[in-house]
Image: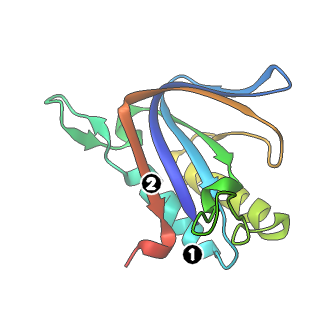
């Protein structure tokens, strides 16, 4: 499982021109589920998400996590995070999980982060054509892959 965390001052997801979800500050998280991912991958990534220290402290050092910063999370499922570009110029998505696995693991990720934060995680709509808007703060963008944790 792969996630991209972007520290944002604001972010939103629109579908058919209507805002579906938005946050004022915190993390915009793109979530990519691969075939073979498990609930263990989800729990490890949820803990990483909440404990990642990428917010500035009083000295201007990235030393605070999202709980300390009082931020929100907007999570969007994105199968393209698992694109393979090794051959040719057209990405292959053969390793991206199908709906049968991706939907429950994406939802579990959101629920795990909600429990750890004690507040709701805003979401996109799985499989929808979404327009994601954000202002990346820093910019700070972190890629975390549960298959590379050792």
Q: CA distance from mark 2 to mark 1?
A: 18 Å
Q: Is residue 46 above or below residue 18?
A: below
Q: Position of residue 118 (x, y in %)?
A: 54, 44
Quarter of the image with the C terminus in it: bottom left
- Residue for badge 2: 143
Q: Which of the colour schemes (rainbow, by chain, secondary structure, one colour) is used?
A: rainbow
For the residues carrying marks 2 and 1, which lies nearer the camera in this image? 2
Q: Secondary structure at mark 1?
A: helix
Q: Is residue 109 left or right of residue 96?
A: left
Disc 2 and disc 1 in contact, CB within 8 angstroms: no
Q: Nearer the viewer, residue 10 or 136?
A: 136
How crowded pointer 1 is (Cα within 10 Å; few <14, some 14-19, many 20+) is rated as: few
Q: Position of residue 25 (x, y in %)?
A: 48, 26
Which residue is at a point 63% across and 73% down the rendered structure image?
A: 39
Q: Nearer the viewer, residue 49 or 7?
A: 7
Question: Residue 70 is drawn in which quadrant?
Answer: top left
Which residue is at a point 63% across and 44% down the rendered structure image?
A: 75
In the current view of this chain or complex, which residue is farthest to the front?
A: 88
Q: Position of residue 14 (x, y in %)?
A: 75, 26
Q: Is residue 4 left or right of residue 108?
A: left
Question: Total marks drawn?
Answer: 2
Q: Nearer the viewer, residue 67 or 16?
A: 16
Which residue is at a point 46% across and 30% down the rendered structure image?
A: 8
Q: Is residue 114 left or right of residue 19?
A: left
Please tell me the numbered disc located at residue 18. none
Quarter of the image with the N terminus in it: bottom right
Q: Is residue 98 above or below residue 61?
A: below
- Residue for badge 1: 40
Which residue is at a point 82% across and 20% down the rendered structure image?
A: 17
Q: Mark 2 or mark 1, which has the lower sequence index?
A: 1
Q: Nearer the viewer, residue 113 or 32?
A: 32
Q: Secondary structure at mark 2?
A: strand
């Amino acid at each position: 499982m792969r996630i991209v965390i972007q520290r944002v001052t604001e972010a939103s997801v629109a579908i058919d021109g209507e805002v579906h979800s938005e946050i004022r500050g915190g993390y915009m998280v793109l979530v990519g589920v691969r075939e073979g991912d498990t609930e263990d991958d989800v729990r490890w990534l949820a803990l990483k998400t909440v404990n990642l220290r990428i917010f500035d402290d009083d000295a201007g050092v990235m030393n605070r996590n999202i709980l300390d910063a009082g931020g929100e999370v907007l999570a969007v499922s994105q199968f393209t995070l698992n694109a393979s570009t090794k051959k040719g110029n057209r990405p292959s998505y053969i390793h991206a999980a199908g709906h049968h696995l991706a939907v429950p693991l994406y939802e579990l990720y959101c629920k795990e982060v909600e429990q750890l934060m004690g507040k709701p995680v805003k979401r996109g709509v799985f499989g929808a054509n979404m327009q994601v808007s954000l202002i990346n703060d820093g910019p700070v963008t972190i890629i975390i892959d549960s298959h590379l944790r050792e």
